[in-house]
Image (cartoon, helix red, strand yellow):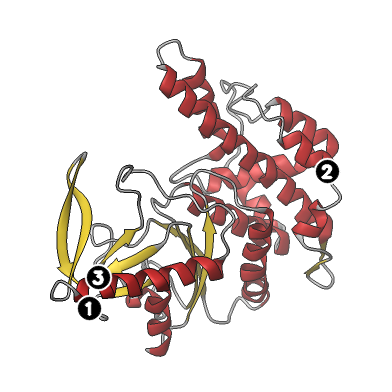
Amino acid sequence: LDLCGEAQQDPEIVPTHPRVDLFHPHQDAADPAPRGRVIWLNMREEPLLYVGDRPFVLRDLANPYVNVELTGITPAKIEAIEGELREDCLRDAAKYNNQLLIHDEITPGVMGGLWEPGTSDSIITIRDIYDNAVTDGARVTFVRLPVTDEQMPEIRDFDILIQSLLPDIIASINYPDGEALSLVFNCQMGRGRTTTGMVVACMLIGLVKPEYYDTLRESYPTLYPSDATKWGNGHYSIVNELMRVLVDGRDAKKRLDYILEACDKMQNLRTAIEMFKNQYESPESSESARARAVHHGKHYLVRYFFLIVLNSYLHEAWDPATQRLGLTFEDYMAPRDELRHLAGRVELK
C-alpha cells in the first residue's frame, strides 16, 4: 500500500494535467508513481478549472493571492460551481474568437492578463479529467473533499475520509498479494490539507494493522527530543485537558505524534504550532505578523486537538473481530459538547 502527497498538478511540477500515467498500474516498486489501483483525494476548496495544462482558481481580483474561502461547502456543490464556471468561461471565450482572458503572476508579485485558447477541449473540470481517465481504462477513484486552507476539516469531512479509505485499506492489508493500492492526496501546495489527509490514512492503517505503530516506534526511537520544549512536544493547556477527558487521551496523542513524524516531509503539525507561537511572542515580529501567527497557530492547534480526538474515537469505536466502526465520528462527537467547548477556548499557551 503506497501513500503519496502532492501539490495541485501543474506543468512546473508534473508534465501534463491528466496524469494518466499515474492511474495505470506500475510493477516497479521503485517507481515514484503510484502503483496498481489509485484512490485520489483532492482536498482543495477553491473552485478549480484546467485551462490548457494549467490549473486556475477563482479569485477576487482585488486580492489575487488570497484563496476564496467556502468553508462548509459540500463536494457536490463545489463540483457544481466548477461546472457552471466552465460554462461561463466557454461563453466568455466565444465572444473573443475562442480566447479566454486569465490572470497569472507574470513576475514575482506582479499580476497580468494572458489570453489562452478557450474551447471545450482546453477548458476542463478536475472531475472530467478523472472521469476521462477511467473511460480510458485507468483504475482510479476520484474523491473531492473541499477543506478550507490552513484549517481543520469539518467533522463530517473526517467521516468522508474514513468511508473513502477504510474499506480499501482493510482489503489491501487482509490480502497483501492482491492488486497494489495507492492513496494519493493533494491540495494547493501539498502541505497542510494534504498532510492532514495522509495522517488520517495512517491512523486507519494503524487501526487495521496495530503492528504499524511498532514500526513507527522503531523508526522514531526519540519521538520527543531531550532539548524540545513542552510546546514542541504538544503540551498546550487544551491538549493536557483533552488527555484527561478522553479514555485513552495520552495514548491517542502519542499515536498521533508518531504519525506526524512519519508524515512530516512537508509539515509537522505539532512543531508548526510552536513555530507560530514563537512568532507571536517574538518582540521582533510586527503587529501584522503577530496577528497572522496567532491566527494560524490557533487553527493549527484546533486541528491537532481534533486529530487526537479522532485517533481516540477510532480505537474506541473499532471492532477488530468484524473490522468495523460501531459509529461515525459525527455520531461520536454529537453528545460530547465538552470537547467542542474545550476546543473553543484554544490559546497558544
Residue located 42% across and 80% down the image: 25
Looking at the picture, which amino acid does disc 1 mark? Thr
Q: Which mark is residue 53?
A: none
> Between tags 3 and 1, which lies in front?
3
> Label 3, label 1: how many angstroms apart (C-alpha)?
10 Å
The one nearer the camera, 196 or 91, is: 91
Q: How far from the left and from the top, in percent, is residue 81?
A: 45, 67
Give me the residue at 50% from left, 43% from top.
150
Q: Residues within 10 Å of mark 1 (few under 14, many from 20)?
A: some
Report crowding for label 3: few under 14, some 14 to 19, many 20 or more residues within 10 A (C-alpha). Answer: some
Q: Amino acid at mark 3?
A: Asp
Q: Which residue is mark 3?
A: 92
Q: Which residue is mark 1?
A: 119
Question: Which residue is outermost to the front?
Answer: 95
Residue wearing tag 2: 337
99 and 237: which is toward the camera: 99
Disc 2 crowd, CA 10 A, few/some/many (<14, 14-19, 20+)? few
Q: Are marks 2 and 1 in contact (CB under 8 Å)?
A: no
The answer to which image quadrant residue 30 occupies is: bottom left
| Image spot of residue 179 (x, y percent) | 53, 81
Q: Position of residue 243 (x, y in %)?
A: 79, 35
| Badge 1 element | loop
Q: Earlier in the sequence, mark 2 or mark 1?
A: 1
19 to 305, vertically: above or below:
below
